[in-house]
Amino acid sequence: AQSVAQPEDQVNVAEGNPLTVKCTYSVSGNPYLFWYVQYPNRGLQFLLKYITGDNLVKGSYGFEAEFNKSQTSFHLKKPSALVSDSALYFCAVRPTDPSGGSYIPTFGRGTSLIVHP
Amino acid sequence: DTEVTQTPKHLVMGMTNKKSLKCEQHMGHRAMYWYKQKAKKPPELMFVYSYEKLSINESVPSRFSPECPNSSLLNLHLHALQPEDSALYLCASSPSMGVTYEQYFGPGTRLTVT
């Protein structure tokens, strides 16, 4: 069965500084990886995904993520954080081959990003 | 239109009430999902409809009853809920259940059971 770990409950960063939100995964075969963001009292919004190809994936709002197969990681990054980036971030994995498992995504527990002015 | 809409935004109901949540999308997506989310936790899958047929039921209590009247609409009928069912209920859709697709989420219905 697939799993996702987001080791940090909360990440604090100053506005203008680079940010990283960590995600590691475990899945049979190759993974399909996703990042979502959730602002207060809102649904989740898709940011970016890795399916295949270039390990550096660019997404919405200036976010990017790097797929590292050897470290089974898919960390979310942004070169310069904004106060408006403060939100809850979820990493998710879907299996390449759902047979014996499930098509549905497995979400990490979420990381609260706080960007200080 | 890349939006998933949900009504109502907020719902307060007693344990003996019957109510329904509604979700709509006009993106032509053929997979639709219901999730339950507690505060600061990841969403928990409840049901998945694929091509208007119930595909996955994650052992959800029968007091929650999903319905997919057509490819654009998804309902969740609620009856005899418990206070612990209070949560944010999220609807999502994707082009199909294929694993390369991201999900599009609605804003959710904040449900309080008194």
Image (spheres, coloured by chain):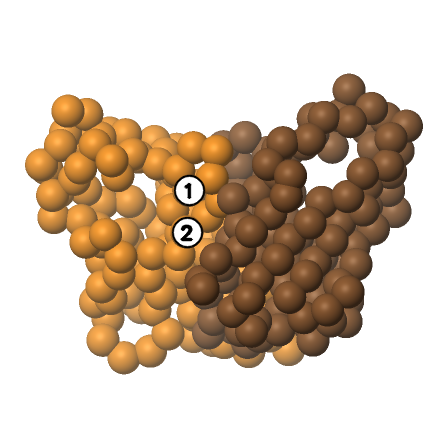
| Chain represented in brown | B
Q: Is residue B104 above or below residue A77?
A: below
Residue A71 or residue A85, whichever sits in front: A85
Quadrant of the rendering where the N terminus of chain B is positioned: bottom left
Tell me which numbered mark, 1 or 2, is placed earlier along the sequence.
Answer: 1
Chain A shade in the render? orange
Q: In which quarter of the image is residue A81?
A: top left
Decide if residue A70 is on the left or right side of residue B27: left
Q: Is residue B16 above or below residue B72?
A: above
Residue at mark 1: A38
Q: Position of residue B108 (x, y in %)?
A: 57, 42
Residue A79 or residue B107, whichever sits in front: B107
Q: Is residue A116 visible?
A: yes
Which amino acid, mark 2?
A: Gln
Q: Is residue B39 above or below residue B47?
A: above
Q: What element carries label 2?
A: strand
Mark 2 residue crowding within 10 angstroms, few (<14) / some (14–19) / many (20+): many
Q: Quadrant of residue A114?
A: top left
Q: What element carries label 1?
A: strand
Q: Can residue A73 be seen in this view?
A: no
Q: Which residue is drawn at 24% across and 71% down?
A: A55
Q: Position of residue A24 (x, y in %)?
A: 38, 54
Q: Do the residues labelled 1 and 2 touch (CB within 8 Å)?
A: yes
Q: Which residue is drawn at 74% across and 32% down?
A: B85
Q: Where is residue B18 in the image (x, y as percent from the top left)?
A: 86, 36
Residue at mark 2: A45
Q: Where is residue B23 in the image (x, y as percent from the top left)?
A: 64, 53
